[in-house]
Image: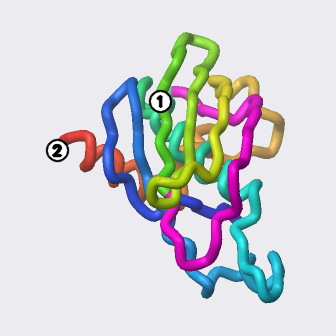
Amino acid sequence: MRWTWIDRFTAFESRKSATAVKCLSLAEDHFADHFPGFPVMPAPLILEGLAQTGGILVGEANQYRENVVLAKMSAKFHREAMAGEQLTYTTTIDDLNETGARVKGTAHSGSDLVAEADIMFAHVKPDQLPPGIPDPKFVFSGELSHLLKMAEAVAKR
């Protein structure tokens, strides 16, 4: 199962930056256990939302010809994100080359900085994938394809 941690893109500038939002609903399963009586978004899921926003930005920069995989991330958290808030993920490309990309990202709730991250992505060719991956374009297929169409629509505005 793949989970999508972006609800929609609100801005998209090809090869430069992307902004997406995620509304944190108490109806999401992870809030029941993390933590009962104090529903906060798990930090790894915040980072996944940033990585998805940045990964789509990097993938679009090469017209999705390359699989873009998360290679490395360092992050700093400033506060928790609570059920009922809306996170805004903003990512900018610092460096893009044939082997991958370096992206800076922030997650805000309103004007409050929730987290910031430096993210490195690698471009992985189909012959570099482990055996058993059925779709050589696995990164930009399935559920993420809907987000790709949204990013493209926002970029055309």
Name the residue: 49% across, 36% down: 91
Q: Please, what secondary structure does the residue beneath circle 2 have?
A: loop
Asked where in the image residue 69 lies, by quadrant, the reply is top right
Name the residue: 33% across, 29% down: 14
Q: Kindly identify the amino acid type of the residue bearing the numbered disc 2.
A: Arg
Q: Is residue 106 left or right of residue 34?
A: left
- Seen from the viewer's position, the closer of residues 76 and 136 is 76
- Seen from the viewer's position, the closer of residues 63 and 42 is 42
Residue beneath disc 2: 157
Residue beneath disc 1: 92
Asked where in the image residue 76 lies, by quadrant, the reply is top right
Magenta stretch: includes residue 78? yes
Q: Residues within 10 Å of mark 2 (few under 14, many from 20)?
A: few
Q: Kindly identify the amino acid type of the residue bearing the numbered disc 1.
A: Thr
Q: Please, what secondary structure does the residue beneath circle 1 have?
A: strand
Tag nearer the camera, 2 or 1: 1
Q: Is residue 108 left or right of residue 146?
A: right
Q: Which of the two labelled residues, at mark 2 and mark 1, occupies the earlier sequence position?
A: 1
Q: How many marks?
A: 2
C-alpha separation, residue under disc 2 versus residue under disc 1: 19 Å
Q: Residue 95, relative to residue 33: is it above or below?
A: above
Name the residue: 19% across, 41% down: 156
Q: Position of residue 109 (x, y in %)?
A: 51, 59
Quick check: can you spot residue 79? yes
Quick check: can you spot residue 124? no
Q: Residue 55, relative to residue 32: is it above or below?
A: above
Which residues are the magenta region? 66-87
Q: Residues within 10 Å of mark 1 (few under 14, many from 20)?
A: many
